[in-house]
Image (cartoon, rainbow, N blue to C red):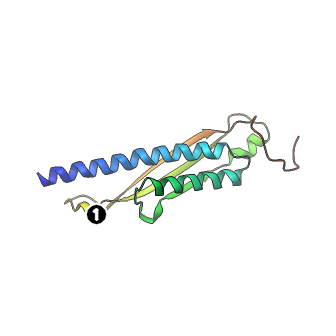
Amino acid sequence: MLLLIGFMVLAGRVAVANNTVTSIAGNAAREASLARTASAASAAASGSARAALAAQDLHCVGGGQVSVDPSGFAAAADGIPGQSVVVTVSCLVNLADLAIPGVPGSRTVSDQGVSPIDINRGVANTGVGP
């Protein structure tokens, strides 16, 4: 009976972590897509994702990892449509405290959020281009 309860807690913990990481990645990508420059997008996405990971109390080992790919900003600044920003969020969830035989001590949950960059948004004046 205790083993069954342990597996239910395990499944719940992993499901909550998966859903939370998915939500955080999507929100961070949206934050990044609203920025005017690639560097501002990276800062906005990283800050948003890290704050959300801490606020959600996931207890990611090492605080979690956030990776931002803002490479679409260069093409969007040139007026090329269809560009996007991609944010990947990973969290190493500790499972060792459950002490269930055969269950690994941790599991990595990861997801990507993708958000389109609006070419009509205000772009920072860099002195280059039209």
Residue at image point 28% right, 63% down:
96
* Between 105 and 5, the one nearer to me in the picture: 5
**Left or right of 76, for residue 19:** left
Seen at 68% across and 48% down, the residue is 71
Q: What residue type is labelled 1?
A: Ala
Residue 130 horizontal side relative to residue 6, left or right = right
Percent position (x, y) of residue 44? 63, 52
* Residue 23 left/right relative to 96: right
Q: Which residue is drawn at 47% across and 58% down?
A: 54
User: Dividing the picture into quarters, in which one does residue 102 lie?
Assistant: bottom left
**Quadrant (top left, top right, bottom left, bottom right) of the C terminus:** top right
Secondary structure of the residue carrying tag 1 is: helix
Q: In this view, does 8 lie to the left or right of 109?
A: left
| Image coords of residue 51 (percent x, y) | 53, 56
The outermost residue toward the bottom is 62
Residue at numbered disc 1: 96
User: Residue 22, percent across and down?
Assistant: 46, 44
Q: Position of residue 52 (x, y in %)?
A: 50, 52
